[in-house]
Image: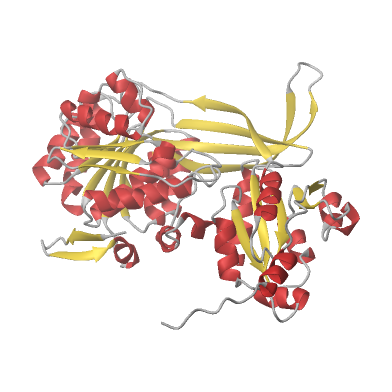
Amino acid sequence: MGQLIIQGRDGTRMSISSTNLLERNLRPRVLLVGDVMLDRYVWGDVERISPEAPIPILRIERQEHRLGGAGSVASMLAALDAQTILATVVGDDEEGRTVGKLLDNLEINRRLMLTVDDRVTTVKERLLGRAQHRYPHQMMRVDRESVAAISTRTVDQLLSGIARCMDEVDLVLVSDYNKGVCKGDLFPRLIELARAAGIPVVADPVKDADYRRYAGCTCITPNRAEAGRALGIRITTPQEGLDAARKLLDFGLQSVIVTLDRDGMAWVDRNGHSKLFPARPRQVCDITGAGDMVLSVLGYMLAAGADTASAIEVANVAGGLEVERLGVVPLTRRDILDELAHSSPAGRKILPMDQLSPTLQRLREAGKRIVMTNGCFDLLHPGHIASLQEARKQGDCLLVAVNSDHSVREIKGSGRPVIDEQGRTEMLAALACVDYVVVFDEASVAGLVDHVMPDVLVKADQYTTEQVVGHESVLRRGGHVVSVPTTPRYSTTDLIQRILNLPVRKRNAA
């Protein structure tokens, strides 16, 4: 991340890095306007099929409520430590009261959350079932909602409250889910209020909307499908995303960010700036919440005084982090800072031991099949590459456990390893077939296998299943032990011996 310019509320300007901005104890003030929802998750086991119809029977174990829609953005802003005022509408029902409690728990100011008796609170109920007590999968979603525009009286009441708090905020964020709050004349009147107060407005638009609805916004953040539908085109490349963003300016917008999932983001503005922000490859667990994460981090950075390009860089990183998690998971500034600290793609694959369990948990919750293998991997050679590539084919994610320098010496003797653990892990992490690398210090990998609980444990075919360390715990849990072919021509020990036996050629003196 490069340097950025921030402007304080007193008009002073200073140059700092994105990392320093995130580390500063800033609490930018954000007014969030939009459609709040209640997400209900019902978890259970599926043990049999109904005798009444060919459908699974879900035996419910627990239920969980989370904030959705604009509420999801509010929870993300709270995790970033922003001061948030939420302007929204809920029904006079139990779900609306639950939304209020969840907001209170996060210390989100909801004095502009209006309760009305002419509509219901939007609820999305997800049924998640496990088969044979394994990982949960979504079976069905049941929605209850009202999508009609809120009444004129409610619009007037909401805007009256917004007008009174304009001097308390640095930025207005709009989370439009097309559930009624942003319909009608609320949006143009909101833009007028913000413009009169000199407050920027950033909106995440709804799909299939007439984008003239967002005229006057400082910035909008459609994804590639939404931008494509608005323009009647198909966006397949980053350059097409940049061209689409430029065309969207014609709707009366100051700037446009088109989010391009695996291709990153494309940004243009009316001052002639344009830039593509690439994304690094990710182990995608769930794309749910990625758009909300981008909006919340973008809003946080802009409200804190960052320039647009720097704010997009950080939001791009945060959006990538979010897709590695199951469901909507708010990120803290520390989460983002840790990601920024590992700037190279290979570096992000190397897991400290304290990050191993949460990473594996996210993968399991997303239904990923985890493969594990281990070794010293001193003098990485084509035989290693072939074995690792075969191991990766056994599942969705390959974790390579590498012996530390200390444990290699215990196993191989004082002359080894030739390459230290940092070099060995960096080489492994640079391979496309390797998803994560972790270093362990024990001579035996048995304890780590028991901790990881892989679905598949892989070793070279020179070992029988009974000789593979950790095979008992894997098989006991219903996993598999797989042998992959080796390349007889290559052996680390033989390679080292051949190098030692090479004649030393003396250089002639100059």
At a point 67% along the width and 39% down the height, the residue shown is: 136
The quadrant in which the N terminus is found is: bottom left
> Toward the viewer: 229 or 42?
229
The answer, for residue 141, to whether it is visible in the render is yes
The answer, for residue 179, to whether it is visible in the render is no
Q: Quadrant of residue 224?
A: top left
Does 61 appear above or below 234?
below
At a point 66% along the width and 46% down the height, the residue shown is: 389
> Toward the viewer: 405 or 197?
405
Does 355 appear above or below 68?
below
Give the left or right position of residue 36, taking residue 466 as reference: left
Give the left or right position of residue 325, taking residue 482 as reference: left
Could you say where residue 431 lies in the image, as x and y percent from the top left? 57, 52
At a point 13% along the width and 37% down the height, the residue shown is: 270
At a point 29% along the width and 22% down the height, the residue shown is: 230
Give the left or right position of residue 399, taking residue 72 as reference: right
